[in-house]
Amino acid sequence: MLTMSQVHIDIARNSTDDFNLFHDKNRWHWLRDNPFEGPISLGFQLGCYIEYQFRLLATQDADEVDTEHFRYSAYDFNFASCVRPDDEVALSVKSGKWSHNDGPSIYSRRLVLKANKKPAIVGFKRDGNQMTLALPAGLPPMHMLNDLPDRDLVPGTDYFLKRKYMILGNAKNFLASAGAEQNLFIDEFADKVDFPEMYPLGLISSALLERAAFEDIDLISNPMIYATQKMCIDKKQLAALRSNDAVNILVGPDISEDAKEFGPESSQKKKVIQECVAYCKEDTPLFIAKVSLLPVQSLKGIER
């Protein structure tokens, strides 16, 4: 169990460059129609807590299926409520199930993250030897990304490029923000560098915010919050990454039904859906993610 604090939230923000005002203890009220009455935790910070709890489960439960040999790790989150400072966070995991679906085996475990005993995230953790998300169409060639300018559209595409870097100190702080024991992942005395899966995934929020700013979307008048996150990461590639390695994150345009009607401005949208793909050193992606966001205006009357 973790008792969330504003310090935890600040550490998570600083380690992933997430400048969203939902997490700002002094400026959360700037956001139009913000229903939360204070700062809230980062979605990927809670994801890191979930990842850590699965890591503990693997080391403490002799009956737990060993998923280390699988190449891909996937998360499917549905956000039911938020987590605030002083909330007590705990994770429950149901017994795993195997699925085949005419393809390679996938091991799935249902999870519920609760804040003060009320569901905050409901979803699944999946492990297998194939990506659980399809690669979006129209992506630029990976080999050209390092030569392109940061924070701009890739020529000839609708994808926005945000270049980030794997920073060891930031990863350790991100683990601390989730109450995780850092030595399970990173230990200089043992020459161990095992970046948590949620650290590069956590950079998605910064990339999404950068794209919104690039499109001149007013993030204060038209704030949005995560509804779902579907993500799959290549653990083999992640294990080979070291500090200062570049991560090129491609952020796609809104592909929701509202996109054609309202364009990039989010004030009248019911939902925004965006796909993100990251490349590092290989021609195959480090991760693929598909996230949906809701305008906070649709959350009026939300219960604490």
Image: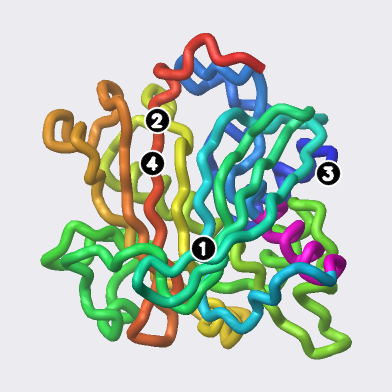
Q: Which residue matches tag 4?
A: 292
Left or right: residue 233 versus residue 143 is right
Q: Is residue 222 above or below residue 114?
A: above
The reply to whether callout 2 and callout 4 are in contact (CB within 8 Å) is yes
Q: Secondary structure at mark 2?
A: strand
Amino acid of disc 1? Ala
For numbered disc 1, what is the local secondary structure?
strand
Q: CA distance from mark 1 to mark 3?
A: 23 Å
Q: Is residue 249 at least partly visible in the picture?
A: no
Q: Quadrant of residue 70?
A: bottom right
> From mark 3 to mark 2, how far is it between C-alphas?
27 Å
Majority SS type along the magenta span = helix
Mark before the other along the chain sequence, 1 or 2: 1
Disc 1 or 4, which lies upstream in sequence?
1
Marked residue nearer the N-terminal end (3 or 2): 3
Residue nearest the observer in this picture, 74 or 301: 74
Please state which of the two labelled residues, at mark 1 or mark 4, is closer to the viewer. Answer: 1
Q: Please name the residue shown 60% across and 20% down the image.
A: 36
Q: Secondary structure at mark 3?
A: strand
Which mark sits nearer the N-terminus, 3 or 4? 3
Query: What residue sits right under mark 3 in the picture?
Result: 2
Secondary structure at numbered mark 4: strand
Q: Tell me how far mark 3 sits from mark 4, CA to CA.
A: 27 Å
Residue annotated with mark 2: 294
